[in-house]
Image (tube, rainbow, N blue to C red):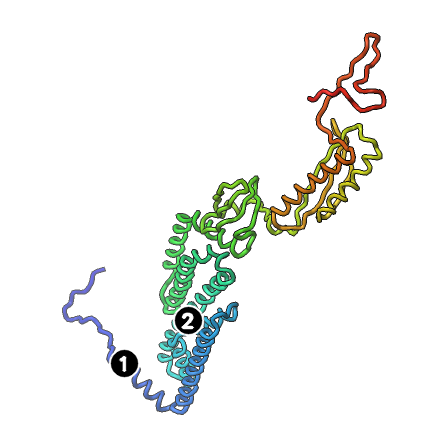
Amino acid sequence: MTQSTDPTIVPEIPDFAGTIDRFIDASTDWVTLHYVELIIAVVIGTSIFFILGAIKRLAARYIRNQDSLIGYRAILTKAISKTTKLFMLMVSIEIVIVASNAPAKIVNFVGVLFTIAVVVQVAIWLREIILGFFKHKLSTDPEENETLANAMTLIRLLVTFVLFAIAAIMILDNLGVDVTGLIAGLGVGGIAIGLAAQGIFSDLFAALSIIFDKPFKRGETITYDSTTGTIEKIGLKSTRLRAITGEEIIISNTNLLDKEIINLTRLARRRTRFGIGVIYQTKPDEARRIPGLLKDIVEQHDAVFIRSGFVGFGDSSINFEVDFDIMSSEYEPVYEGRHAIGLAILQKFNEEGLEFAYPTQTTFTSAPDGKMIMPYPEGGFPVHIEES
């Protein structure tokens, strides 16, 4: 198709002046015909503006006078204090336009501005509420949540970007702009960033999970796999522990949460079991006394006796067990209590003449006539024992 080259044809120029004149004429007619409704609407809108302003000032004053206020009430109050004058003004104007039966062009124009103000204000409120939630979590124990304090800059950046990106898309969509390509572009960009920083974000979210779920905190002793240590620091990417043998252990937050973790600090008690073997030459009556002796020893050392009794015949011993609890969440009292009870058992068995067994072999010989020669006197205990 060829374009016309006739010089007599002049391109049509939009009549902006005429459009403005028609808009002014329509507005003048509207004011003339509905001035009563307009006055009433202006009074109502002005009142709404000042009421919203008063609420904002009261919220701001309340926050200033209550520095120690924490909790969700403080978060909501601070969010209210962030209400913008643009939002209050557009709410008032929207009320005036709706109540005064304004022309369609004015309604549409004000409606666009009102939508922009509302979307931006909601984004500001949500940002303040979300960040307020994180700050509230941090204020409960600043030392414990050192990781959250270090992450606040990144969290603030992410929350601000996400909320205002959504707000911009909503505003453009209300203006009639096709945002499909923009959403697709943001989605592709987000996927690319996520893949590039997958490890960092994974450990960061794991750190936040540790902070909010609290499977453990700094100063507590935990066990995972074959490692036991005390938490020294929970970082953005890794957690540092001090092993009971003294070395520092560093493990990524993601790997740590993937393991089965036993929190030893939160134990109200710790159970200990001693296995005790006595020689086969122990008389049955003496063996029956052993559980009672063990119970008395445990109770004399302020531990909680659970059970004790015979558990089996070993290769070189008659085996007993004793279970008891030491009521402490700290490891040192448990360690000292176990030490004291163990030595008390040793002392009591020596006093009672009860002999502990150890792996032995007994050699039996025979006389030339084939008669068995016992390795100990008749009716007595062994006197000839070879240790293996």
Residue 153 location, quadrant = bottom left
Give the mark, 2 or 1, whose residue is nearer the N terminus.
Answer: 1
Q: Nearer the viewer, residue 147 or 328?
A: 328
Query: Which circle marks residue 20 in the picture?
Result: 1
Say which element carries label 1: helix
Task: Give the class, few, some or many, for how many residues have Cα within 10 Å of label 1's Cα (few <14, many ≥20).
Answer: few
Image coords of residue 181 (percent x, y): 37, 58
- Provide the residue designation for mark 2: 121
Q: Nearer the viewer, residue 161 or 130?
A: 130
Q: Nearer the viewer, residue 159 or 185?
A: 159
Q: Tell me whether the residue at label 2 lies in contact with that at label 1, contact meaning CB atoms closer than 8 angstroms.
A: no
**Position of 131 compared to 363: left or right?**
left
Query: Which circle marks residue 378 in the picture?
Result: none
**What is the residue that sits farthest to the top in this orientation?**
368
Residue at left offset 27%, top offset 83%: 21
Residue at left offset 51%, top offset 68%: 70
When the figure is inspected, residue 202 is found, relative to residue 18, above or below; the finding is above
Image coords of residue 333 (percent x, y): 63, 47
Amino acid type of the residue tagged 2 in the rendering = Gln
**What is the residue that sits farthest to the left in this orientation?**
7
Task: Give the class, few, some or many, for how many residues have Cα within 10 Å of label 2's Cα (few <14, many ≥20).
Answer: many
Residue at left offset 38%, top offset 65%: 168
**Position of 82 compared to 331: left or right?**
left
Residue 297 location, quadrant = top right
**Position of 380 compared to 388: left or right?**
right
Residue 165 location, quadrant = bottom left
Q: How many marks?
A: 2
Of badges 2 and 1, the one in the foreground is 2
Image coords of residue 192 (percent x, y): 39, 50
